[in-house]
Image (cartoon, rainbow, N blue to C red):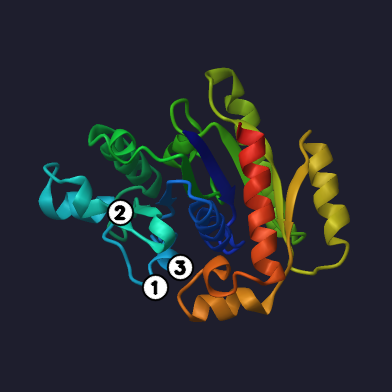
Amino acid sequence: MIKMAIYGKGGIGKSTTISNVAAAYAKQGLKVMQIGCDPKADSTLLLRKGIELPTVLDTVREKGNNISLEEITAVGAAGVICVEAGGPTPGLGCAGRGIITALDKLKELGAYERFQPDVVLYDVLGDVVCGGFSMPMRGGYADKVFIITSGENMAIHAAANIAMAVENFKDRGYAGLGGLILNRRNVRDEDAKVAELAQDINSKVIGTLSRSDLVLEAENLGQTVVEAFPESEMAGEYRTLAAALLEICK
């Protein structure tokens, strides 16, 4: 079982990228599990035609600890197993603590043994990397951490902070940094800025995604590009990225 945690600032395109990568793996015949660790609980929408999935935290709040995997998982596009950790009641509780609770519950219920996925993808908000938001980096969860960024200053700042967290945790047996994914916004000197960031954090850019109208067109259909436009160049870019991620994690 290969496990990857993919981080990045909010709005950088994490969920879209991860869902397309998940669909690409599933189309290859791999069994995939995608776990959304963003309090917005929107990681798996494109795999479920826009239908929201009951979150682990909401289900625990409603029914207590006596819940089943069937109540907090669903099968999405191409057979991808979907999970949403969810967040606390607005104004109450800590989102990071919620992620810890959700991942602990999945472990307690034997989700990995039950579904036996070939690939597990954790979709993690990276604006703040502390407490529960670092949970997927810990031993037993992800093998590698990948960071999605663009050439925008705030995205680069967030990516640098995530890389610093990975470096600070390395002596605890946490996941190592697998590399950067450039999700283009077509800003000035974008390639050079992200290449400089990679050099600064002793890493590399392992994949690049173009800015494409097909991404929005597919989202309007409630699908990934890999499903909606499988023959497109953009779908090919997602498949290429998926292969690169898998190769680094082997």
Determine the secondary structure under disc 2: loop
**Is 33 situated left or right of 102 in this image?**
right
What residue is disc 1 on? 50
- How far is mark 3 from mark 2, CA to CA? 23 Å
**Crowding near the residue tagged with mark 1, few <14, some 14–19, many ≥20 C-alpha atoms within 10 Å:** some
For the residue marked with disc 2, what is the amino acid? Pro
What residue is disc 3 on? 46
**Residue located 80% across and 51% down the image:** 194
Tell me where residue 42 appears, x and y as whole percent.
42, 63
Observer-nearest residue: 93 or 29? Answer: 29
For the residue marked with disc 1, what is the amino acid? Gly
Observer-nearest residue: 195 or 126? Answer: 195
For the residue marked with disc 3, what is the amino acid? Leu
Residue 4 in view, yes or no: yes
Instruction: Please say if 49 is above or below 115.
Output: below
**Residue located 41% across and 66% down the image:** 45
Whether pointer 2 and pointer 1 mark residues with C-beta atoms closer than 8 Å, the reply is no
- How far is mark 1 from mark 3, CA to CA? 6 Å
Whether pointer 1 and pointer 3 mark residues with C-beta atoms closer than 8 Å, the reply is yes
Task: Name the mark on residue 88.
Answer: 2
- How far is mark 2 from mark 1, CA to CA? 22 Å
**Is 197 situated left or right of 104 in this image?**
right
Tell me where residue 93 appears, x and y as whole percent.
30, 49
Hey, which residue is sitting farthest front in the picture? 29
Residue 158 in view, yes or no: no
Tell me where residue 217 appears, x and y as whole percent.
57, 81
**Residue located 33% across and 71% down the image:** 51
Quadrant of the rendered image containing residue 10: bottom right
Tell me where residue 16 appears, x and y as whole percent.
55, 63
Determine the secondary structure under disc 3: helix
Quadrant (top left/top right/bottom left/bottom right) for the C terminus = top right
